[in-house]
Structure formats: C-alpha cells, structure tokens
Amino acid sequence: MDRNTNRGFTLMELMIVLAIIGILAAIAYPSYQSQTQKTRRSDGQTALLRAVQQMERYYTENNSYAGAVAGTTFQTASDEGFYTLSFQAGPTASTYTLQAVPGAAQAGDPCGTLTINQANQKLPANCW
C-alpha cells in the first residue's frame, strides 16, 4: 500500500485564488483612484485659500483688489503642482475670482476647475 504523500496546491485551487485576487483588485483600484483625486484636490483648495488670504490682506491695506496680483506674491501653481492658479478681476475694484485649473495628473477629477470669489462662494460646491 504505497500512497502518494505529495502535498501542494492543485491547479484549480491556484486559479480560484487568482480569480479572487483579481476581483478584489477590480473593486479596490477605483476606490484608490477616487481617494487619490480627493487628496490632490486638497492641494488646489489649499492654494486657493492661501491666495484668498493674500487678496484680503491686500484689500485691507488698499481698499481695492485692483493690482492685487502685482502687489502680492501670488503663486501661479499649487504647492504640489497638481493645479494652476489664475486671477480674474471682477467688474468692480471690490470683486475678484480665483480659479485652480487641474493639471495633467488631476485631469480625470470629476470636480474639474475649482473656483472661489471675494464673497467666499466656492464652486463646484460639492467638491469643497
């Protein structure tokens, strides 16, 4: 009675394990991408809020936003480089709009361009 005592995994067992790993990866990767975009989005939000502070300091001293970009150290890129910042003067000297346009690494973000104005109105609202 010579019995085969080899131990190990069968090909079927290995295929089942690979299928389970594939399913878990298919579920986890989109979630990971979503969290990565949210993290990168905070880079743009932080840059905009810092620019708002600079604008308000300038307004406090000059009672106008006109010339604020030239009168401050306005950065044109976020700290991590995921967004490009832009300033748009409003129709009056007491209004402005700041935008953070996503770069290549953040191009797939469903929120797109982040915007804030002198009244602290933030768009898109669900992305702040």
Image (cartoon, helix red, strand yellow):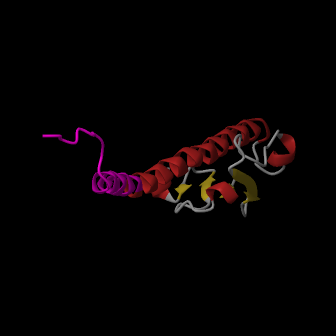
Q: In the rendered picture of this protein, how many numbered marks are placed on residues?
A: 0
Q: Give the dominant element type of the magenta stretch: helix, strand or loop.
A: helix
Q: Could you tell me which residue is drawn at 39 percent across and 56 percent down? A: 22
Left or right of 108 on screen, residue 21: left
Identify the residue shown where x is 79% and y is 40%: 62
Query: Which residues, given as a range, are shown in magenta?
Result: 1-25
User: Is residue 102 in view?
Assistant: no
For residue 47, what is the image quadrant? top right
Give the image location of residue 69, x and y in percent.
82, 47
Q: Quadrant of residue 122?
A: bottom right
Foreground pick, 34 / 17: 17
Q: Is residue 32 visible?
A: yes
Percent across and percent down for residue 23 are: 35, 57
Report the residue that reaches farthest toward the left.
1
- Magenta span includes 20: yes
Q: In the figure, residue 96 lies in which quadrant? A: bottom right
Question: Which residue: 74% across, 59% down?
Answer: 88
- Residue 48 locus on image (x, y percent): 65, 46
Residue lying farthest to the right in this orientation: 70
Instruction: Please give left or right for residue 92 compared with residue 2 in the image.
Output: right
Name the quarter where the N terminus is drawn: top left
Pick the front one: 110 or 65: 110
- Along the line of sight, which residue is nearer the eye, 47 or 89? 47
Residue 27 is a magenta residue: no
